[in-house]
Amino acid sequence: MPAALDRSYDGIIIGAGHHGLVLGSYLARCGLDILLVDRRLQYGGALVTEEVTAPGFYHNLHSINHFHISETPWFKDLALADRVTYITPRYEFGQPHLDGSALVFGRDLEETLANVARFSKRDAATFRDWNRKAEEITARIFLPERFSEPLPRAEREALLSRSDIGRDFLAATKRQPFDVVQELFENEHVQLLFLFKISLFGTWLVDTMSKTSPMGSVIRAFDLQSGYQLCKGGSANLAHGLMETFIGAGGRFAPQVELDRIVIEGGKATGIALQDGRTVRAGQFVASTLNVHQTFEDYIGRAQLPAAFLKKLDEFEYTKWTIFGLHLALREPVRFHAEKFDPNIHRTLKWSLGAETMDELIAAHKDVMADRVPQIVQFGSGALSVLDPTQAPPGKHTTYAWHVMPLNPDIGSCDYETFKQEFAERIIEKWVRYAPNMTRKNIIAQHVYTAREYTQTFPEMRGGDIFMGAFSAEQVMYNHFGYRTPIERLYMAGSATHPGGAISGGGGYISAGVIARDLGLELWWKPWDAAGALGAVPAATSRGKLTSFFSAFLRWNCGFFGGSLCASPGQVFDHFAHLVGVKSMRAGPMIFGKDRPTSKRQ
Ligand SMILES: Cc1cc2nc3c(=O)[nH]c(=O)nc-3n(C[C@H](O)[C@H](O)[C@H](O)COP(=O)(O)OP(=O)(O)OC[C@H]3O[C@@H](n4cnc5c(N)ncnc54)[C@H](O)[C@@H]3O)c2cc1C
């Protein structure tokens, strides 16, 4: 058999991250002869698990928290549950505070409401209303759209406008998530945790403050049923499962491939040219999962692209923050003061630590935007080895801190290595105020990993943007970069396409359907379809008076039906107290102090 790079294929996929692996697996199962190439020796892209601190401690250097993965269409279609195990933590978001209290959101509504009520009964009642609607919107709209080719805006809005929850959702997408959370909830701790929940890994700062959120991410603040999961043994195990699937379907993988260019002949993509002079031909398509500038500037060249497309390329934006990561091998798990207040903080997947007020949170945003090292240390973390003991040696533990940071922080005359160690020390100093055992005595070893390092490993994460494209209103849903390109037979299949960066697999899954249909293949799976899903939403739902709070709030507040844009929370509250009756608004039935429900979840 000729070596992988010495023969032709039906299709070539560039980049063996999870998007490339998902795409390759679908198309290889269609019977196509597929070559997947990567510049690295390893595959899986940012699904990386390494023993970087001490032997037996497995650290996920890049992605850790995988959103709702085991329920995605590709995880099911590709029967990945036979190869990869996902842990669904019962407690998903937790926020310890310096006063010894903690707020924990779990998957169980009543338990979570009871937790919120310890901070504000009114906020718990508001959360109940929003949750009811949000669960329905997530299941009927948000998730189907996440894994479908986006509909044109007019068609989408017409379909959404036909149902109660569709109108509610549409209205929510026209609000700034930051405003919605601040207006709805009175307690600062509650506001902070909701903002952490809709952000990705605590780095909410920029995208949450976009004027609108066409994807509807604000809804994700209020649902509890879908959420983040942990890949057992480490994130790299998802990459292994996907590669086994791809190879099992007949695909070929070539690592350490130095690409020179994508070959364009007669306006069509016909293969890839390598830096060693070889050309590998693709009879039917070439797909890129790299970022848009690598694909079109580095490997195609501006001269081959139409002016309108170049404008789009030039206007494409990346997120302005990066991640400063501190990975720790521990003798014992993190033990918070706040465990006395809520013992479940100990086993929560994602902790938000360090910001005690909205002002402190905003200070970090301002610092990052101004290229300053954030003054107030505040970071995301989680109880990884408590939830998955296989990620550390028996009885030992791992955890991490992800801190938002500019790519090139102003560190004065300090050299970067010294800055890394000093900032890691500041993180530990902050941590110990919340968790008294987070001292140097407990830390066996540490590994600091910042954007300076991960952009070396992954040049596709341009400027340190972990998502390879900002989630701004101008770049998501019907405004995404697109699966098809101006060059025939050349497709985009990665993070630049809907639903964007993160371990969602969406770009690989959706582009598989697009390419297969363009090639006239018989599809062995049934691609999700947004028009079908939105069309199937019942026109009226069983909303009672209470849930009409949701839509009425949005309509009134966002001007969806020509209303005012500037209602205060108090006005809103009074308005709805009038609408639904003060009693039901102000104090829902609380189960504070009752036994907490049990679950098989961890
Ligand atoms: C520090 C950090 C933390 C993160 N945390 C999370 C998290 O908790 N949850 C989450 O969902 N997401 C997280 N992400 C984001 C997530 O990892 C990415 O969005 C995701 O990996 C994108 O997948 P992809 O397949 O599009 O690209 P990648 O995973 O980047 O894969 C692209 C592949 O292309 C290859 N490649 C690059 N250039 C070339 C070239 N010239 N020729 C050939 N191959 C090339 C790369 O080697 C790589 O294998 C994190 C990212 C980072 C950096």
Image: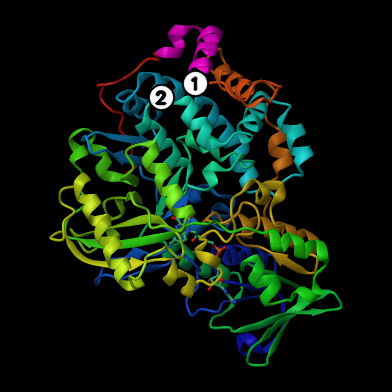
Please say whether residue 575 is one of the residues in the magenta stretch. yes
Q: Is residue 520 visible?
A: no
Number of marks present in the image shown: 2
Residue labelled with disc 1? 569
Q: Residue furthest bottom?
A: 277
Please say whether residue 515 is one of the residues in the magenta stretch. no
- Can you tell which mark lies on residue 186? 2
Left or right: 219, with 173 as reference point: left
The disc, 2 or 1, on the residue closer to the chain's N-terminal end is 2
Identify the residue shown where x is 45% and y is 22%: 126
Residue 302 position within the rendered picture, expressed as x and y whole percent measured from the top left = 76, 73
Q: Residues within 10 Å of mark 2 (few under 14, many from 20)?
A: some
- Residue 597 vertical placement versus 2 (above, below): above
- Please tell me which residue lies in front, 61 or 238: 61
Residue interval drawn in magenta = 569-586
Q: Quadrant of the N terminus?
A: bottom right
Q: Residue furthest right?
A: 266
- Residue 155 vertical placement versus 278 (above, below): above
- Please tell me which residue lies in front, 23 or 525: 23
Residue 549 position within the rendered picture, expressed as x and y whole percent measured from the top left = 55, 18
